Amino acid sequence: QQLAVVVSEVAARGVAVAPAGRAADSRGLEGAAFEIGCAKIIAGEGAQTTAAIAHQVFAAIGITEDHELHHTTRRLWSWRDEAGSERFWAGEIGRNTLARGGAALWPDITARDIP
């Protein structure tokens, strides 16, 4: 069951990241900030969930420094903070929405290629 959760988490992250990549290709990084922010939030949350499950499955073995899971988990955690954490991007999206007015949020979500 836990493996199925990990697989679904990974698939969900792919669904979030692909539109951000397409938006960045077509509109540049500034023009794709909304999609990139959404993908960053979703990917970061998935990294946390996936790492927690992996450590449950491997138990204490994954904590030892010589086990590959230890290194992978540390890298996942550091990626979460690179280029802005989930909290940073949620704040950016929120500030942008407030600046444009709350009525802009729904069109932002439905008119864009995001999950």
Image (tube, rainbow, N blue to C red):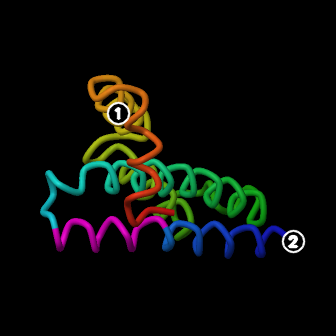
Q: Residue furthest right?
A: 1
Left or right relative to 81: residue 25: left
Picture coordinates of residue 100, whole percent (x, y): 28, 29
Amino acid at the residue labelled 1: Phe
Asked whether 103 or 84 is in front, the reply is 103
- Residue 107 sits inside the magenta stretch: no
Amino acid at the residue labelled 2: Gln
Q: Quadrant of the N terminus?
A: bottom right
Rendered image quadrant of residue 28? bottom left
| Disc ID at residue 88 | 1
Picture coordinates of residue 57, whole percent (x, y): 78, 65
Asked whether 81 or 43 is in front, the reply is 43
- Tell me the magenta residue range: 16-26
Instruction: Name the residue: 32% across, 49% down.
Output: 34
| Disc ID at residue 1 | 2
Picture coordinates of residue 114, whole percent (x, y): 44, 62
* CA neighbours of label 1 inside 10 A, class few (<14), some (14 to 19), many (20+): some
